[in-house]
Amino acid sequence: MTQREGEFFKTLNEVLGSKWYVVPQVHLSALLNHKVKGQNWKGAFQHINGKSVDFVLLSKETTKPICAIELDDSSHDRSDRSARDDEVERIFKQANIPLARFRKTDNLSKQDIVNTIALAIKSTK
């Protein structure tokens, strides 16, 4: 993890750790069912395996994903990265898993973090 990700990880655990597990650096293949009937399994797996998200919140009761979290820095402004971000958003939307994005984390309050995640979860339901 980068220093920024490490600091955000600590904050997520402080704010949400009593309710959910906070798991860093999760590959999409660990979250998603890539075994779609009639689809090339290897192709589907390779498509999602090369992608990851910065954090995933998991239910402590069921260990099912509650929300994925991405920290977007200036590298996300590049066209190749923007296309990757669009694809990750599409994949999560199709899987019905909320995805919360944070652009600037330096001055976020803990309540701002909670509100952004709550909004992502609410918008998926």
Image (cartoon, grey):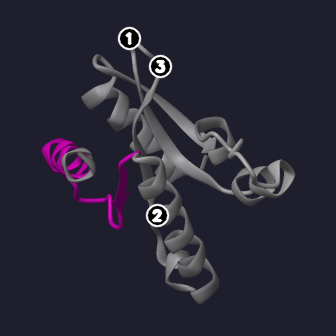
| Relative horizontal placement of residue 106, taking residue 111 as reference (left or right) | right
- The question of residue 113 being in magenta is answered with yes
Q: Are marks 1 and 3 in contact (CB under 8 Å)?
A: yes
What is the residue that sits farthest to the bottom in this orientation?
79
Q: Counting other residues with Cα less than 10 Å from the Cα at mark 3, is it few (<14), some (14-19), or many (20 or more)?
A: few
Residue drawn at point x = 34 percent, y = 60 percent: 102
Q: Which residues are magenta?
A: 97-120
60 is higher (above) or lower (below) than 21: above
Image quadrant where one finds the C terminus: top left
Residue drawn at point x = 60 percent, y = 72 percent: 84
Q: Are marks 2 and 3 in contact (CB under 8 Å)?
A: no
What is the residue that sits farthest to the top in this orientation?
61
What is the residue that sits farthest to the front in this orientation?
38
User: Residue 63, percent across and down?
Assistant: 47, 19
Label 1, label 3: how many angstroms apart (C-alpha)? 6 Å
Q: Earlier in the sequence, mark 2 or mark 1?
A: 1
In this view, the residue in front, 66 or 26, is 66
Instruction: Read off the residue under disc 2.
Output: 89
Secondary element at tag 1: loop
Instruction: Read off the residue under disc 1.
Output: 61
Label 2, label 1: how many angstroms apart (C-alpha)? 26 Å
User: Residue 106, percent across and down?
Assistant: 31, 59
In the rendering, which numbered label is found on residue 63?
A: 3
Count of numbered labels shown in the rendering: 3
Secondary element at tag 2: helix
Secondary element at tag 3: loop
User: Residue 91, percent across and down?
Assistant: 53, 58
47 is higher (above) or lower (below) than 121: below
Question: Hey, what amino acid is under mark 1?
Answer: Glu
Residue drawn at point x = 40 percent, y = 47 percent: 96
